[in-house]
Amino acid sequence: MTSEDQEYGASRRPVEDEVDVVAEETQKPAKGDKEKKGSFWKELPVLVVVALVLALIIKTFVIQAFYIPSESMENTLLKNDRVLVNKLVYHTRDIERGDVVVFSGVDSWDGEFEMEEPSNPIAAFFRWVGTAFGVVPGEKDYIKRVIGVGGDHVKCCDSKGRITVNGTAIDEESYLYPGNVPSDRFFDITVPPDRLWVMGDHRSVSLDSRSHTGDQGGGSIPEGQVIGRAFVIVWPFNRAGVLSIPDTFAQPALQALGESVPLVAGFGLAVPLVLVRRRRLGRKR
């Protein structure tokens, strides 16, 4: 080996040593990466809790998913469908005829289906979560269509077998279950104030207002028990769609009594007051 080769060899050795050191450093996981992974697993429970709290707030005040447990609203809603229910809508407008509403039947109506009680607190918790997200049905929640509101005269049936509201027949062909008649039993009720007459679209199997005519309110339900309006089907995807109000409920004649009750009552109270005031003014003159 010449003196020149020795000189070059001496200059190469440090480079090789540096390469080995760099390789060792790249193979070792950085300390910051370990800390990031550790912090993620520490934060995960917090993220889960925050997500559940936000879901609970949304469920309680804004929108909730509901599971359809029975055939009472076929073919509008099929068993095992999932719908979203708007809980804010009735803070901005009144409940309308034709709305599909979810309401609580606690301490009143018997369930259309039976569910076993949870065997332990853990099972009860998971049922609560499932109900909140529309995975399992709520045992005392019902879904029906509003046929009459407070003040309406709802009757079955006219000479053509149609239900009438305030003397006006409603055409239910667009949503009534194929082969069903509007009702197989007679009823004639003036819906009390702040209550609703509700019926399922599958009339032959629905346990609705007609099945509770002996209850307080004559089968009608309190508006205060309404949870919200079902406005869209979200599952299964091939049935996804909006739940709109059928055109038959837009007939002007239907408004003859229901919405006019407060106005009529107002005039009824105002007229005597005006007459009394005029008499007093006449006496003073």
Image (cartoon, grey):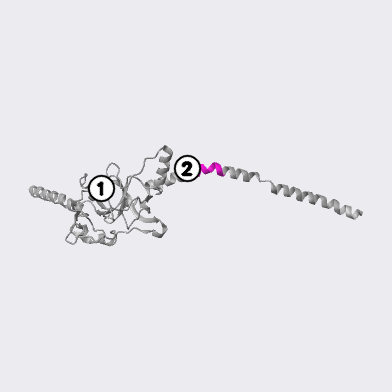
Instruction: Please give the range of residues in magenta.
Output: 40-49
- The crowd level at tag 1 (other Cα within 10 Å; few <14, some 14-19, many 20+) is many
Tell me, yes or no, if residue 48 can be seen here.
yes
- The crowd level at tag 2 (other Cα within 10 Å; few <14, some 14-19, many 20+) is few
Q: What is the total number of numbered labels drawn onto the structure image?
A: 2
The rendered magenta stretch, by its main secondary structure, is classed as helix
For residue 44: magenta? yes
Tell me, yes or no, if residue 194 can be seen here.
no
Going by the picture, which residue comes out furthest to the right? Answer: 2
Residue at figure coordinates x 11%, y 48% from the top left: 276
Residue matched to label 1:
221
Q: Which of these two is toward me, 278 or 64? A: 64
Residue at figure coordinates x 42%, y 40% from the top left: 123
Q: Secondary structure at mark 2?
A: helix
36 sits left or right of 242 in the view: right
Q: Earlier in the sequence, mark 2 or mark 1?
A: 2
Quadrant for the N terminus, please.
bottom right
Alpha carbon separation for disc pair 2 and 1: 36 Å
Going by the picture, which residue comes out furthest to the top? Answer: 120
Quadrant of the image occupied by residue 153: bottom left
Q: Percent x, y for residue 118?
A: 39, 40
Q: Percent x, y for residue 52?
A: 45, 44
Q: Which of the labelled discs sits on residue 44, or is there none?
A: none
Q: Which of these two is toward me, 283 or 151? A: 151
Is residue 253 depicted above or below 190 in this figure? Answer: below
For residue 175: magenta? no
Type of amino acid under label 1: Ile
Nearer the camera: disc 2 or disc 1: 1
Q: Percent x, y for residue 53?
A: 44, 44
Type of amino acid under label 2: Val
Q: Percent x, y for residue 231?
A: 35, 55
Q: Which of the labelled discs sits on residue 49, or is there none?
A: 2
